[in-house]
Structure formats: structure tokens, C-alpha cells
Image: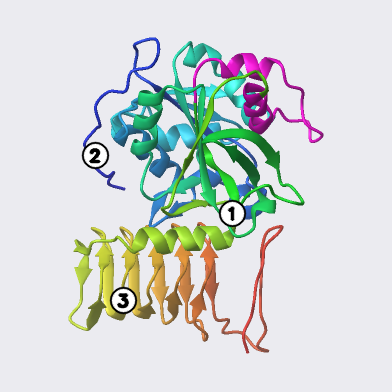
Amino acid sequence: MALQAYTLSPCVLTRQGQGMKGLVLSGGAGTRLRPITYTSAKQLVPVANKPVLFFALEALVAAGITEIGIVVGDTRQEVRTAVGDGSAFGAKVTYIEQEAPLGLAHAVKISRAFLGEDDFVLYLGDNLIRDGITELVERFATAQPDALVLLASVPHPERFGVAELKDGQVVRLVEKPAVPPSNLALVGVYLFSACIFDAIAQIQPSPRGELEITDAIQQLITGGKRVEPHIITGWWKDTGRLEDMLEANRVILERLEGRIEGEIGEDVRLEGAVVVEKGATLRDCTVRGPAIIGSGTLVEHAYIGPFTSVHDRCRIVHCEVENSIVLADSELNSIGARVESSLIGRGCFVGRSTTRPRAHKIMIGDHSRVEVSD
């Protein structure tokens, strides 16, 4: 996967005169994306054939932040293998191991040795912000509040942590309130000075046994610290559910620029923005973009519809796929109905049975969902 090149913004200096650091959270169980996340870190599930975590790293580097800590849990080795030392992103990465998912504030607490006294960006690795965070980082460096929280207007604020504002400052945070004080939800990006560590030291675990970052920010407010909001108007998404992954995939693909590096047969029809990676083969098929076909993938006697990402080394034969994500090494073969709005995991096979009597043969993991048409 080729990484996107960025022009770095000027180096952002903290109160200590050093470069601002980044702290990316890449732990957690990813229960809402099971069974995919039984065998993979949720932050490494790809949209537009790129792991969501990579978008976070690229956003930090684009904002001039190149010293990055990644908090990892049970999937630590998979994350290390995917990211490496960070040089592929133009960054230097330090890994910080969290023994268990004990809360966002706990992840910050155990990162004190890495962060020191520097200002830092806390970025949840399964969040995707299409327009990046450069403006946010520059505002923090200029105004130098004690904390700056990213907010977005949402239709159902009762599902989120919600901020109450007064005179341009955050005066209260409420976690999933029955009666929200506003429609401004906390997005998974925060900027802090080192005073957040004193705030964390004064809070207690929540009823679910975690140190909550909302409690730590509320402690800053209670202690008279300056907590400023930054309301974004662009697109953002917490990619924790299937519907969110598919929407993120659509949004990223909307900006896709067509590129053909694979083998294209004479009987292939391409429409719109289509990426065909090197080593992919297309025969007797239609691909209607935006869509991306990964390296080593075969598409034959098939239709690939808009907003579809097919990863590497897949086989899509005698079937139709649209508005879906197909992960690496999977095969879709001779399926009677169109596959749409679906997430197919790694190394999967979905196809028509040739045995008699005809029947559906299904092997799926826990918490899976299958809808079969007539």
C-alpha cells in the first residue's frame, strides 16, 4: 500500500519549546466489529484498502507532528508489523503497551514517560477525519489553552459524550446524557498540555472500571483550567460498526483518482474513477467507480459497483459486488444475488454449492450476520 505524501506544516512548538507529540490509541477489543476483530486489530481494518490507523498517522504528520507514541494492547504485534518504526510515514514511532483496556485516561497516564512535559495530540486510532487536524493543531499552538477538544454537531447526542459551552469555553462534559445540554459530541481527537496528568491523578475509575478522559477534562474545568472547543464542519466517523466502515469507505473513495497499473482485458469496461493496482487482472467484467481493486486480485465475468474496495489477492468471479469491502485473500464465486453493503473478512469464501440436494452451507464466527435472498 502506497502511502500518501504530505507537505508538513511548520513545526509546532510546545510550551517547552519542543515539537508537539502525538499519542495514538490502538488497543481495545473492537467488539462492535466482531467477528472481523477476533483476528485483527479494529484500527487495521481497511477503508479504500488502507488501514484506518494509517489515516490517523498521516493526519498527524501532515500537521507537523512526527514524534508519535502508539498505545497497543492484545493486537500489539499486528500493529507493530503494519506500522513498523514509522519511517514509512515520515515519523518516529514509540510503542506503549497497555495491560488491559482500562480507559482513555489510563492510556494517557501510562504514556507519561514518552510525553514528558510536552503538549500532545490524543488521537483515537479508529477515528477518521477526512480534512485532517492541521487547523486544530495550529489553533492550539497559537492560543495555548490547557486543553482543546474537537466537537461535531450530531443528530443523536445522547449516544456520545456531550459538551456544554459558555462564552466560547467548555464548562461541562456529560457522558451519554438522557437530556443532552447541546448537540455537540466529542470527536476522538483531543489536544492537551501536561496539566492533564494532574487531572488524571485526581479522578477515580468509572462504574465500568475505566479512567475516563471525559472525567479528566471535567477535572481540568473544575480546577479552573482553560478548555476550549473546536467545532468541525467537515466529515468525521468513529469506524466502530459495519455501517460506519462502509460510510467511511464511501467518503474516502469519493476523492479517489483513477489509476490503472494492472492487466486489463479487451472485454473490460471501466467507468468513473477506478484504481487497478499492479498485479491485478480484470477479464470480461465491468467496474463502475469509485472503486479500487488490490494487487494480485482477479475479477472475471463479474460486476464491481460503486464504492467497493477489493483488497489484495482476492478472486471475484461470476458475481456482482457493490458498496462493499472485501478484505485480502477472499473469494466470491458464482453468487446468484448481488452482494452489497457487506464487509467480507480475510481469507473467506462465499460461493454457490454444486452438491445435491441444494442447501446453504455456512460456517461463520461469533457475532456474525448473514442475510440470504431467495
Q: Position of residue 315 (x, y in %)?
A: 40, 69
Q: Is residue 197 magenta?
A: yes
Range of residues picked out in magenta = 192-221
Q: Nearer the viewer, mark 1 or mark 2?
A: 2
Nearer the N terminus, badge 2 or badge 3?
2
Mark 3–mark 1 Cα distance, whole angstroms, equals 26 Å
Amino acid at dot 3: Val
Secondary element at image label 1? helix
Q: Is residue 121 magenta?
A: no
Amino acid at dot 2: Tyr
Q: Position of residue 142 (x, y in %)?
A: 35, 25
Q: Position of residue 157 (x, y in %)?
A: 64, 53
Mark 2–mark 3 Cα distance, whole angstroms, equals 29 Å
Please name the residue that numbered disc 1 is placed on: 36
Nearer the N terminus, badge 1 or badge 2?
2
Mark 1–mark 2 Cα distance, whole angstroms, equals 31 Å
Question: For the point 66% across and 19% down, which residue is it?
Answer: 200
Please name the residue that numbered disc 2 is placed on: 6
